[in-house]
Amino acid sequence: MACIVCGSNETVRSHIIPRALFRLGARTGHQIIGSRRNQPGYQYLQSGFWDDNILCSAHEMRLGKYDDYAARFCRRFFQATSDGAFAVTVSNPRPHDLVSFAAACVWRMAAARSDSQPINLLGPYAEHLRQMLFGDATFDPLLLVSRSAFVHGKDTLNLSMLPHRYQELGINFWRFVACGIIFDLKLDARPAPPAMAMLAVNDARDVLLHEDFPQQVLGTPMIAASLRMMGGAGKR
């Protein structure tokens, strides 16, 4: 297959959530879940999720620096939470790299779920993200970061989620969860309300992460619909 960015080179395996984060999450007992392709329900992922039809090695490597940065960020988060602290501060010396990491995960997922046509899922934001990641365009979509606390009934769910579309107060986001952190990338021209914008990390060189209020996973749009089709919220 030809790379969908340059159109000429052979494609390589491209992980939606980088392997380093998958392994880091797996070591702490997190289960990675994602929706099935072209059918209802969800699946547990044993070795990550990838697509080998979207990027050539050169363009995959271009995203590698953002993946590496996110892996270091998540390791610092795990180190800070090892003592069970309610609120932790994680160093974020290059905020734009964290935003670019989230954008790369979302763009890859949209490409993988649309037969290499991310515009079908992202609309005009597909080109904005492509130019941000692979060109010289300046684009800084709002990224909100918080700690995950998904529950089903009284049971805490120790899981991570692949990127999926999500709405909060009518505003469009793409959400994914990795290593116990929720990443919400706003792809919507409407401004976020002040209470939501407090979670923004676009200019934050130190990210304060509070332990989130428990969220019933079946009350979370998109992923809830997929989970309900399988008749439950899955295993712990």
Image (tube, rainbow, N blue to C red):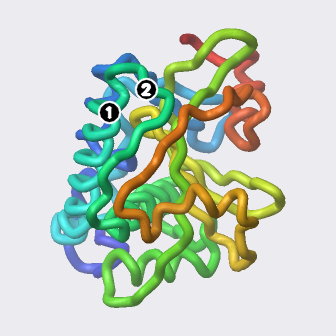
Residue 232 is drawn in which quadrant? Answer: top right
Looking at the picture, how far across and down is residue 102, in whole percent?
43, 58
- The amino acid pointed to by label 2 is Ala
Looking at the picture, how far across and down is residue 147, in whole percent?
52, 37
Residue 115 in sight here = no
Looking at the picture, how far across and down is residue 219, in whole percent?
79, 33
Tell me if residue 158 comes above or below residue 136 in the rendering.
above
Residue at image point 27% right, 63% down: 93
Tell me if residue 39 comes above or below residue 121 in the rendering.
above
Crowding near the residue tagged with mark 1, few <14, some 14–19, many ≥20 C-alpha atoms within 10 Å: some
Which quadrant of the figure contains the N terminus? bottom left
Foreground of the two, 18 or 170: 170
Foreground of the two, 210 or 21: 210
Under tag 1, what secondary structure? helix
Under tag 2, what secondary structure? loop
Which quadrant of the figure contains the C terminus? top right
Figure disc tally: 2
Tell me which label, 1 or 2, sits earlier in the chain: 1
Foreground of the two, 212 or 156: 212
What residue would you read off at disc 1?
80
- The amino acid pointed to by label 1 is Ala
- Circles 1, 2 touching at the beta carbon (< 8 Å): yes
Give the number of the disc on residue 85: 2
Looking at the picture, how far across and down is residue 67, in whole percent?
27, 54
Residue 38 is drawn in which quadrant? Answer: top right
Specify whether 145 is left or right of 220: left
Residue 224 is drawn in which quadrant? Answer: top right
